[in-house]
Image: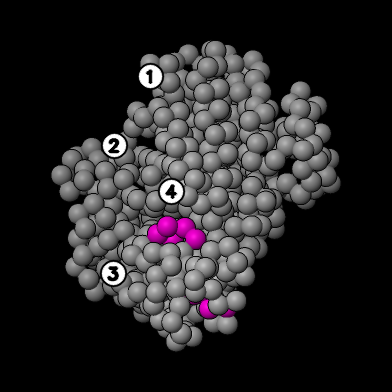
Amino acid sequence: MAAAAELQAQPSQEKYAHSYGTLRAMGALIVAREISWEEAPATQQSFANFLTGVQEMIRTDPEFSGQLDIDGKPKERQIIDGQACDIDGRPLVDMVRTGLRESEALARDEPAFKSQAIRDKGDEMVAEMGDDLLPGQSGFAVSMAPKKALREHPEIYRDHFGYRYDLIYIQSYSKQDESLWTGFCSIEVKDEKILAEVLAEEGVIIPPDTPHDEWIQHNWQADLTPEQAEQHILGIRDKYYERVGMTEKRYSVSDYVENNSDVVESLFHAYYPGLAEAVSTRKNNETMQGLASALLQADLQKMKPEIRAQLIRVANSSYFNDDMCATMESVIRYAVVEELRKGLKDLVTTGKVFTETSPDSASARLPETGFSSALAMMELNQRMANNVQSGVKAGRSYGGCAGQVELNEGGDGLLGGLSGGQSKQEPYGGKSCKSIKHGESTTCPHCKKSVKTIVPVAGGKVYCNNGQCKEAAPQGLLKRFAPKDKRSL
């Protein structure tokens, strides 16, 4: 994942429990009416998370993904007391270690998380490598997709963590003066043996029997500047693509998003202050209610009913909780990606970053007056609703570190962390409800039978354990997680 590649994506508690500490901190500044909230570390981190999520989602676009790569331009990290730190001054290595402790604890209770614990241990090793670099040195690591875990536990590694089979990242870390520069690039890998051969030519030996989760432990160093380190990892990618015969021109999602930065920044500032304030104060506001109402008026017959139920709550409630936040953040990102993808066809067919003559393209400027007026926000809400409507009708879903985002019915992907509502019967069929525990006795609303719940991930998706139910858990989950005293197989 790109965010993991930078060792800074989100605080680990957000990574594993879908909490919103960074957004809450941003919201608290807004509520306090701090003049500088726009420049505060929490706001910068929220925007960085938003930007990373949007880029990764675009990279997984079902129509264009085979022609897109992510190039994470080197970012400067301040070094404090010998440790590289995040935007708000937290040592990166401490963040990674916190994630490692949590994944190890999860793995003790549920072996399905063992793969993630191994990967987090690799991240710790890389973070330590970055801190140990000398000025003028660069370090590199390869994060391979957890293919075995993806096959065995797609509900965790695809839907929750956002991994993809063929998507890996090469990470770079460069020490210069009092800063550590972190960068990465994605590679679409179809033949890992050839990738290992290319790496071997760079002096990096990864034995043939190395588990995918342990590739990252085979890191290497070189005397390179941040600029040279960036070219080094891009060169490895180019050599791999040439070696496997991937000659079709590929395009940088990072460059594409940067060239549409006015759109991305405008939409972030239009919605995220309201989202942050709502989740911080637990009080709903006009920004969230207006967008939810516009979405409910769109033609979204194919939208998952649990998402529609949450939108109804946001449109009509005075309170605002984490489940609402998960829904609205996912919907906002989905609408932004749908806005940006309007120009992707032009990019991959003509090579142009945008088409100035197309009023529907992502480069078409948003209202010059901003969104200070109620009319401007109504127009923007309608535009966002139209974007969601287009994506849902087409059945498009997107993945990435934030998890699989799929709003339409009939697909495997689900909104990471989304609750189906307060009713304990609503969440069945892969929906999520934090109040439901694994093995609870209840009546399934679909098969109408007395069953026990299957909750593979605490606070995550809930399934019916009746193998004959249309909303039953997949066979792999039934065999592995169905309560032994009530197994319907």
Q: CA distance from mark 1 to mark 3?
A: 42 Å
Q: Do the residues under discs 3 and 2 have CB atoms within 8 angstroms?
A: no
- Which residue bears the numbered disc 4? 16
Q: Residues within 10 Å of mark 2 (few under 14, many from 20)?
A: some
Q: Which residue is mark 1?
A: 80
Identify residue type, mark 4. Tyr
Q: Nearer the viewer, residue 422 or 312?
A: 422
Q: Mark 2 or 4, which is nearer the eye?
A: 4
Quadrant, the N terminus: top right
Q: Which residue is mark 2?
A: 40
Residue at 24 percent across and 57 percent down: it is 278
- Residue 293: give x, y in percent of width and height: 31, 74
Type of amino acid at the residue the image marks with label 3:
Val
Q: Which residue is mark 3?
A: 314
Which residue appears at 50% of the width and 20% of the height?
131
Residue drawn at the location 65% of the way across and 36% of the way down = 214
Q: Secondary structure at mark 3?
A: helix
Q: Quadrant of the C terminus?
A: bottom right
Query: Residue 457: x and y, percent?
Result: 47, 58
Q: Which residues are magenta?
A: 456-467
Q: Is residue 142 magenta?
A: no
Mark nearer the viewer, 3 or 4: 4
Q: Main secondary structure of the magenta part?
A: loop
Q: Which mark is residue 384?
A: none
Between circles 3 and 2, the one closer to the viewer is 3
Mark pair 3, 2: CA separation: 27 Å
User: Is residue 386 in sight in this rendering?
Assistant: no
Secondary structure type for disc 2: loop
Mark 1 or mark 3: whose residue is earlier in sequence: 1
Dot 2 or dot 4, earlier in sequence: 4
